[in-house]
Image (tube, rainbow, N blue to C red):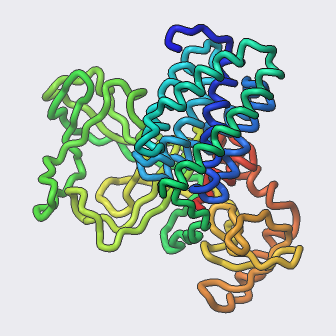
Amino acid sequence: MPGTTLLPWQAGLWVAGCLERLAPYVHACGTPRAAGFYRDSVDAFWTGHGELAAPDAERIAAVGAKLRALCEEYSAEAQIFGVIVRAAEAARQSTAEPMEQLVTWTVDLWAELGSDDDSGDREAQAQRDTLAMTQQPPAQAAAQIRIVSARLGAEWAARLANHGLLNADSERPEIVIPPHDLPYQVGDVVAVSCPWTPTVTTRAGKYHAAVRWPWAVLDPDSAYGPNGSFAFPVDESTEPWWPYQLRPPAAELDEGDRCTVGIPPTRCYVVRSNRYDPPMDDGFLPRLTASIALLPAGSGYADAADVWLERAEPFEMKLLHRPYGALRSGDTVDDADGRRLQFVPPFLFYADGGRVRPAWPLALVTRDGVTPPQDAVDAVATATAVGSHADEIERWLTYSEAPYTVTVAEELFDET
């Protein structure tokens, strides 16, 4: 297989065959939401005869990355969703090589998932057979590869079950209700800044420059032995975004150089909020009891930057927009269709463990488990009297500039 030159649609069908063979495993072991997303993603490859439309590729990459982040880092589930994400990203490129590399990599994944007598040879042979099938016209190739791959996937899943290696558990996880006592919550669009503060470069290397953190208060009882410095990448594109910046940038600094650290005025949105009990030890004081994670406005789902709400930094944050601002995390409401729903920020509603889209207007029923005050009931009724749930998310997309549709935005914040 190495060195084989494929057209993009052929490489796409090749990948689709691999994904189809994994589908029974995901259906048996994944949550309903994960299995449904996987099925929809594979179907998108078949529908396009291997070539994804740009909106399909964007949705698959975004939601797949979210699901992968919810899994343990090196688990089979994380690898499976990694396949989906890489396939969607590679399908948008003009050459087939990324697809070929991806498909070769899946042999190792199959070996990890398989039984002792299945070392990946079976999948390697299936890939060679799929490669031969791509020599037919696109529609004919797609149909044949799909039929054969579905059969092989079912046979393989049955073999795993017989070996006791297929631990099917499709129960939906409990809905996680985030704390509502933090000043900022998931989905908030905020303006952040921090005044430029003088400091000095303590170390400069090929990849990082470290500076003395001007607001550091070291924890003498910390298990980490901190030295009071923070490192900044020389090439910012190699690491996740962080709101703090250096002037001049890390690439221009040598050890002993004077510089400043701060945050230029930046619009962001909150993608995660956390409480720590007991307080978290990260080497500094006070120990942390709360944090939020931010992404800059206009960015898609990626590694978010954690910022702390209790430190000495003159970190300034101003709320610009909060979707469903009249509701609190965990509120229960009745919608216009008579359904009893539970609210989870920023704009998710659940009934019987499944996510639903509410019909406006909404009536607040309970808050913190008790009957809410009348002013809270009136605020919710007024806020949802005109418009719709989709309109509320569209407003959030306007403020956050997140490059998603309403449907994808909901998927990204759904933790179930």
Viewer-proximal residue among 211 and 390: 390
Position above or below: 344 against 187 = below
Residue in view at x 75 percent, y 49 percent: 406
Instruction: Work out whether 124 lies above or below 388.
Output: above
Q: Is residue 320 visible?
A: no
Q: In front: 82, or 234?
A: 82
Q: Quadrant of the C terminus?
A: bottom right
Give the left or right position of residue 52, taking residue 103 as reference: right
Q: Residue furthest bottom?
A: 371
Q: Is residue 404 above or below residue 354?
A: above
In percent of width and height, residue 99 lies at 58, 21
Instruction: Using the rendered image of the protein, determine whether residue 362 is visible from the camera's viewpoint.
Output: yes
> Which sits in the foreground, 319 or 182?
182
Percent x, y for residue 317?
48, 55
Residue 353 is situated, as x and y percent measured from the top left of the image, at 67, 71
Estimate the x, y position of residue 203 in percent, counting from the top left.
16, 31
Numbered disc total: 0
Q: Residue at x 70, y 39 (%)?
A: 150
Q: Residue at x 68, y 88 (%)?
A: 372
Kindly indicate the quadrant of the structure image that contains residue 248: top left
Q: Is residue 356 left or right of residue 270?
A: right
Occupied quadrant, residue 204 = top left
Q: Residue at x 41, y 43 (%)?
A: 116
Left or right, 90 with reference to 252: right
Residue 346 shown left or right of residue 121 in the figure: right
